[in-house]
Image (cartoon, rainbow, N blue to C red):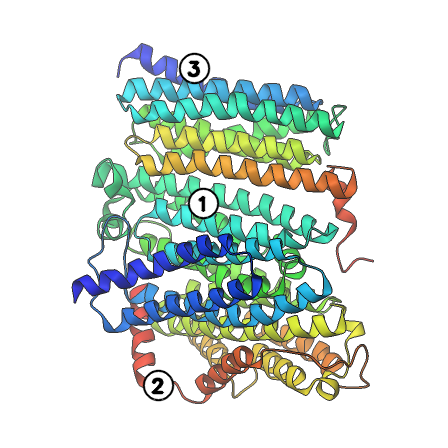
Amino acid sequence: MNGLTFDIAHLLAGGLVLVSFMMLYQDRLFALINVFALHAVVLALSVAWQAYVQDAHHLYVTAAIALVFKAIVIPVGLHRIIQRLGIHRDIETAVGIGPTMLAGIGLVTLSMVLMLRVTPDADPLAREDLAFALSIILLGLLVMVTRRNAVSQVVGFMSLENGLVLAATGAKGMPLVVEISVAFSILIAFIVIGVFLFRIRERFDSVDVGALDDYRGERR
Amino acid sequence: MTAFSFDAVAAILLIPPLAAALMAALPNYKVTARLNVVASLLTLLAALSLFVTDRPQPGQYLLVDDLNIVFIVLNTFVGFTTSIFSATYIAHELETGRLTAPNLRFYHAMYQIMMFGMNLAFVSNNIGLMWVAVELATLTTVLMVGIYRTHEALEAAWKYFILGSVGIALALFGTILVYMAAQPVVGEGTNAMVWTVLIEQAARFDPALLNVAFVFLLLGYGTKVGLAPLHAWLPDAHAEGPTPISAVLSGLLLNVALYAVLRFKMLLAASPQAIAPGPLMIAMGLTSLIFAAFMLYRRRDIKRLFAYSSIEHMGIIVFAFGMGGPLANFAGLLHMVMHSLTKSAIFFAVGHIAQVKGTQKIDDIKGLTETHPGLGWALVIGVVAIAGLPPLGIFMSEFLIVSSTFARQPLLAIPLVFGLLLAFGALLLRLTGVAFGEPRGSTAPVEASYVPMYSHLALVFAAGIYLPAPLVAWFQHVATILG
C-alpha cells in the first residue's frame, strides 16, 4: 500500500471521528441532523475509497446505500418529522457540553489505546479503521446517553451504526452478507423508529424520553 | 436418508415464514389463531425429527450438532405450548377490547417471524448470520411489546429497542473483531465467519484480539440475556407486553442470546493463550443473581416480579456455564431447560390471573387457590418450582450447581447460596399473599387453557424425580463439548 492511498483512508476515517465530535455539541435538532448527514457523506466517501483501494466492488454498494439513505433520505425524513411535531427548538442535553467533550476525548483515547495495542500484526489500514470505528461507536453511545430527546437518540444510534459500517469495510474481504444486513437493519430501524415516534407523538404530545420516565411501576 | 434430514432443517426454517405470510393475509382471527398452533406444532415435529434422521453436513451457513438440537427442541416445544395459551389469551383480549382484529393479524404474523428468527439463530453456522437472526428476533419482539399502544407499553418498547440495539451493535463489533482475528489464519471471505472452521483454527488466532472480541460479545449478547447491569429493558418489556410474549421472552429469547454467548465461549476456550472466559461470566452471573434477588422484595406488579426472577435465573445459568467443567455445564444446561419450562408455565398462569382480576398489582390479587383453584395451584406449583424447592426439577439443577461450586470454589458458593436463599424468601413471601388468604378482586369464572401450564409443570416435576438415562447421557455429552 503506498503512502497516499493510506493517507487518504486515514484522513477520511479521522474525519468521521471529527464529525462525531461535532455532534456532541449541537444543541439544536436541525443542526444535529445536518451534522449527521455530513457524517453519512464522509462515511460514504470513506467506504468508496476502501472499495477502490481493496478493489472490492461490492463495497461501492455499501457506499451508495450510505449516501442515499443515510445522507439524504433519513435526514429529510427526520426534518419533516421534527417540523410536524413542532419541536425544532433546543435539545435538552442531560449533561453540559464541556464535560461531554471531555468524556468524548477520554473515550477516543481509550479506544486508540485498546485497539492499537491488541492489533500489532494486523494490516495497518484495517488497524486504524478499527480504532477509529470504536471511537465512533463510543461517541455515538455518548450522544445517546447525553440526550433526552427521542429524535437525537435515534441520530446517536445511527452514527453508532456508521462506526460499525466503517469497521466492517475495514476488515478486508468480510462477506457481503454482513454489509447488506447492516444497511438493512438501519432501514428497519428507521421504520421502527418512525412508527414509534409517530405514536409517541400521538399519545403524549412530546418526544422527550424523559417525559416517559414517570411510570416505573414500583416507584409511586 | 440424507435428503430427508436436510428437509428437517429446511422445514424448521420454512414453516414459520410461510405461516406468517399466510396469517398476515387472512382476516379471521379465529382461523389465524388455530393456524398459529398448527404451524408451531409442525415446526416442533420437524425439530423432533432431527433426533431420528441423519444430520446434514455443516455448511457455510447451517449447522446441526448435539448442542443446538437441545435448544431447537426446547424452543419449538415452548413455542408450540405458548401458541395454545396465546389462542385463549387473545380471545379474552379481543372481548375486552384491548386488542383489535387487525392487531391480531399483525401479532400472529410477528409471532411466527420471531420463531423463525430464533430457530435461524440456533441452526446458523455463520456468526454473521447468527447476528442477523438475533437482531430479527429482537425487532419482532420490540413490535409485539408495544402492541397495546398504551403509555407504559410504548415506554417499555422504546427502552427495549434502544438498549437492545446498543447491545446488538456491540455484538456486531465483536463479530467483526472475531473475523479480523480469523482472517490472517483462515483467509478472506465467508469461511472466516463459519463457526465450525473457526473452532478448528481458533488455537492459531491472535489471542489479544479474541479477548477484546469476547468482551464486546459478552456485553452485547449479555444485554439480551438480561445480565445486570444491562438488564434495564427486561422488566418493562415483560410487564407491558402481552403475556404470551412475556412467556417466550423469558422462556426462549433469553436462551437465544445465551446460546450465542456459549458458542463464542467455546471459541475462546479453544484458544489456549486467550483469557479464560469463565471469570467474566461468573462475575456477571453472580451480580445478576444477587441484584435480582434484592429487587424481588420490592415488586408490586406480578409480571415484573417474575421478570426479575428471570434475571436471577439467567444469572445462575451464566454462573454455571462460567464455572465450566462437565458437572457445572450439565447443571447449567438442565437449569436452562427447567427454567424455560417453569417460567413460561408461570407466565401462562399469570396471564389468565391478570385477565380475570383485571390488574397486575400484587396487592389486589389474593386468595387465588379459593376462587380459581386451577390457576391458583398452577401458580403455587410454579413458584415452588422456580424458588428451588424439592422435588421439582429446578431444585436438582440448583443443587448440582451449588455442590459443584462447593467442590471447586468454596468461596464463590457463599454469594451463590446467599442469592438463592434471598430470592427463595422473596418469592414465597409474595406467593402466600397471592395464593392464599381472603379472596380479593373478581371471582368470575375464567376460560383458561390449563393444558400448556400443567404439561410444563408435569415435565418439571418428572425431571425432578427421574431423568431418563438417554437424556442424561445426551446432556453429559453436550456438557463435555461445552468445555
Residue A53 in picture, x, y percent from top left? 29, 18
| Closer-to-camera residue (B327/B165) | B165
| Closer-to-camera residue (B2/B203) | B2
Q: How crowded is mark 1: few (under 14 residues within 10 Å), some or many (20 or more)?
A: many
Distance (Cα) linking label 2 and label 1: 37 Å
Name the element at disc 3: helix
Name above or below for residue A78 compared with residue B405: above
Left or right of residue B63, residue B372 in this image: right
| Closer-to-camera residue (B154/B282) | B154
Which numbered circle lies on residue B171? 1
Residue shown at the point (26%, 17%) measured from the top left: A1
Name the element at disc 2: loop
The answer to whether residue B227 is seen in the rendering is no
Which numbered circle lies on residue B468? 2
- Which is in the foreground here, disc 3 or disc 2? 2
Which quadrant of the structure image shows residue B359? Answer: bottom right
| Closer-to-camera residue (B24/B148) | B24
Point out the residue furthest to the top here: A4
Which numbered circle lies on residue A52? none
Subunit of label 1: B
Q: Which amino acid does label 1 sit on?
A: Ala
Which quadrant of the structure image shows residue B1? Answer: bottom left
Q: What residue type is labelled 3?
A: Leu
Question: In the rendered image, which residue does mark 3 sit on?
Answer: A11
Q: Earlier in the sequence, mark 2 or mark 1?
A: 1
Which quarter of the figure is the C terminus of chain B placed in? Answer: bottom left
Subunit of label 3: A
Residue B262 in picture, x, y percent from top left? 39, 58
Name above or below for residue B118 compared with residue A128: below
Name above or below for residue A66 compared with residue A211: above
